[in-house]
């Protein structure tokens, strides 16, 4: 734990099972349990209200963070101060289907020309990490109970490990889930363009706000 008494903020981090100094073997369910236990400890034992807790995840950590946020929303109706996802992805199978080693050497991408073969290999991916589905569900849950959701996504355009298009997929799924009913594609794209702020070459910021739901 890191603490700054001047600004009254604390950073709590953990090594998931099987990572760092933690024992055990990592799994999707196990990692979500570990992170959920830490958040529950902060709320119930340390007495920190969710309105003062910001969840931050990077790479695989974004999948864990998303799963934890959705779990607390679904089971307890809890909204956090914010969620920050750095280099997220829609799901592990989807990302692997287009993954290139070092951004150069494609692994499964050549199999896209033969979907049945690609699906066969992706069947062996045990942990799916369906972040897109979880965040879309989280957004819908928050909208239905008139809750509060603040999510910021950061992704480098030249990310060699996780293509930035993965964050775009997640963002668009959340944006669609934030409105009631189905938004036609032309309307969605027009709305997205209107809310996009160009910050430089390959740099932009999109803010999608619906009542008390905001994604960036």
Image: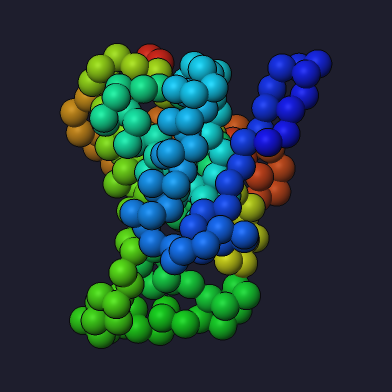
Q: Is residue 145 left or right of residue 9?
A: left
Rendered residue at 39%/72% (across/down): 97
Q: Is residue 6 left or right of residue 214?
A: right
Image coordinates of residue 105 in percent, x first then y, are 56, 83
- Between 78 and 94, the residue placed more toward the observer is 78
Rendered residue at 38%/55% (across/down): 30
Q: Is residue 136 visible to us here?
A: yes
Q: Is residue 190 visible to us here?
A: no
Q: Which quadrant would residue 159 be assigned to in this image?
A: bottom right
- Between 166 and 28, the residue placed more toward the observer is 28
Q: Is residue 206 left or right of residue 127?
A: right
Q: Which quadrant would residue 154 be assigned to in this image?
A: top right
Image coordinates of residue 66 in percent, x first then y, are 42, 42
Rendered residue at 72%/34% (across/down): 2
Considering only vertical position in the picture, is 73 above or below 189?
Answer: above
- Between 129 and 89, the residue placed more toward the observer is 129
Q: Is residue 67 left or right of residue 35?
A: left
Count of numbered labels shown in the rendering: 0
Q: Quadrant of the N terminus?
A: top right
Rendered residue at 42%/71% (across/down): 96
Rendered image coloring scheme: rainbow
Considering only vertical position in the picture, is 150 above or below 62?
Answer: above
């Amino acid at each position: 734990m890191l603490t700054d008494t001047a600004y009254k903020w604390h950073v709590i981090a953990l090594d998931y099972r099987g990572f760092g100094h933690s024992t055990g073997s990592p799994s999707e369910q196990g990692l979500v349990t570990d992170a959920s236990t830490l958040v529950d400890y902060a709320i119930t034992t340390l007495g920190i209200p969710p309105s003062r807790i910001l969840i931050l995840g990077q790479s695989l950590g974004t999948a864990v963070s998303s799963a934890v946020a959705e779990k607390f929303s679904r089971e307890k109706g809890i909204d956090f101060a914010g969620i920050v996802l750095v280099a997220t992805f829609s799901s592990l199978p989807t990302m692997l289907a287009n993954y290139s080693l070092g951004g150069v050497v494609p692994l499964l991408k050549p199999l896209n020309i033969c979907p049945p073969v690609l699906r066969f290999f992706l069947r062996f991916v045990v942990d799916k990490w369906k972040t897109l589905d979880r965040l879309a569900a989280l957004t819908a849950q928050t909208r239905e109970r008139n809750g509060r959701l603040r999510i910021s996504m950061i992704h480098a355009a030249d990310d060699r490990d996780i293509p930035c298009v993965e964050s775009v997929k997640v963002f668009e799924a959340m944006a669609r889930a934030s409105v009631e009913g189905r938004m036609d594609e032309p309307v969605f794209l027009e709305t997205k363009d209107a809310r996009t702020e160009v910050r430089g070459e390959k740099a932009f910021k999109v803010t999608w706000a619906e009542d008390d739901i905001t994604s960036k």
